[in-house]
Amino acid sequence: MWIQDPCLFQTQDTASDLNRLPTLIALALLNAGAFWLWYEFSREQGVADVAGKVISVPQFREALRQHLFRRGIDWQTCSDDQKATHRKAVLDAMADGLRLSRVSGSVLADVRSGKVDSEFQDFIAEFDPETEYGRRLALQQETEPQLLERIAMRQHEETWLEGKLAQISLRGVPDKLETQAAEVWRVRQLFLSAFEVGKPDRLAEIEAYYQKITSGVAGLEELISLYSEDARTKGLGGDLGWFSDRRMPAEFMAEVKKAAPGKVSVPFKTKIGWHIIELIDHKPAHRLSTSEMALEQRAIVELEARSQALKAILEDLRTVEGAEITLNPRIPLDSLEPL
């Protein structure tokens, strides 16, 4: 892309330099023109421009896929209005990310840190077989080093944002404070995604794993470590931690409530995929003690304060000159599907 004069780095006397000045000016203009053409081409191929940075079509489609996957949403069952809502939510989130990178400062991303590697491994674990990971990178028009740098930069931005949030003062007490602790469950699961490319039906797979458990060939935790597609819990033996029925989908909770402690459930299907679960523990609803109420109150105040501070930071970033979203009319947003 860049045009370089082979004589640029040779020692010349002053008169010779002056003679070459028109050539240098011409080269500078050619380089500037080449950059402008590249930038304009990138803009034409992008979904939108935010803070001077382009959101490419592959980036947007991958972000849309992740948005749906994390929420267990089946794109094919969404109405046109719902699809429009999801697309806008993804675009707004990506725009906020670009605005944040603009103010958090450019740094030399450390792609060798343990945190980066951990998130990178979690990302790879989303894809089975691993060849799908390479295909996904190609669709995003991204190399592995670029992916690592992107992860490192996003973690830097999160650290910057956490520093801002740490400066908030905790004030205000919620009008209503829960005095009753909700009923909670703790479960481990083996999970197979319903959105795996080329695998529309995972029933045979999940039944084969269940057969191994019931026949004594393998334990649930062993199979989770090998085959579960929940990257967040795969290395934790599938442990989902404590949760109430307000945190989980009703169809999943219906199976949890039927589970017996220490017993492995039969495979069951939800909107996001197939599950085999084991109930680790269960706590019935109970009245909070004074100390529990104090902790609950502080947690509620902190959460509310952080939420309000985050909204204020993002609103400020959105009002900075040049931070608006400029859509590309050549690529309508409603024409884009998840990867």
Image: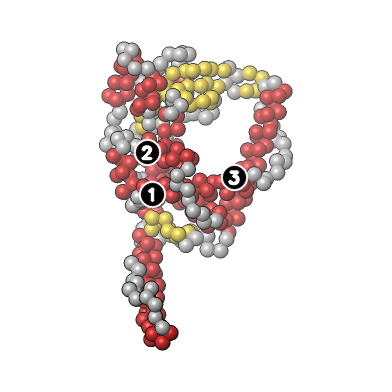
Callout 1, which amino acid? Pro
Residue 20 visible from this viewpoint: yes
- Name the mark on residue 145: 1
Q: Residue 298's spot in the image, x, y percent?
A: 68, 33
The residue beneath circle 2 is: 124
The mark nearer the N terminus, 1 or 3, is 1
The residue beneath circle 3 is: 162
Q: Residue 165's spot in the image, x, y percent?
A: 63, 45
Q: Residue at x 39, y 69 (%)?
A: 36
**Would you say 127 lies left or right of 327 here?**
left
The mark nearer the N terminus, 3 or 2, is 2
Relative to 123, say whether 323 is above or below. below
Where is the C terminus found, in terms of image quarters?
Answer: top left
Q: Quadrant of residue 294?
A: top right
Residue 68 visible from this viewpoint: no
Q: Residue at x 43, y 49 (%)?
A: 149
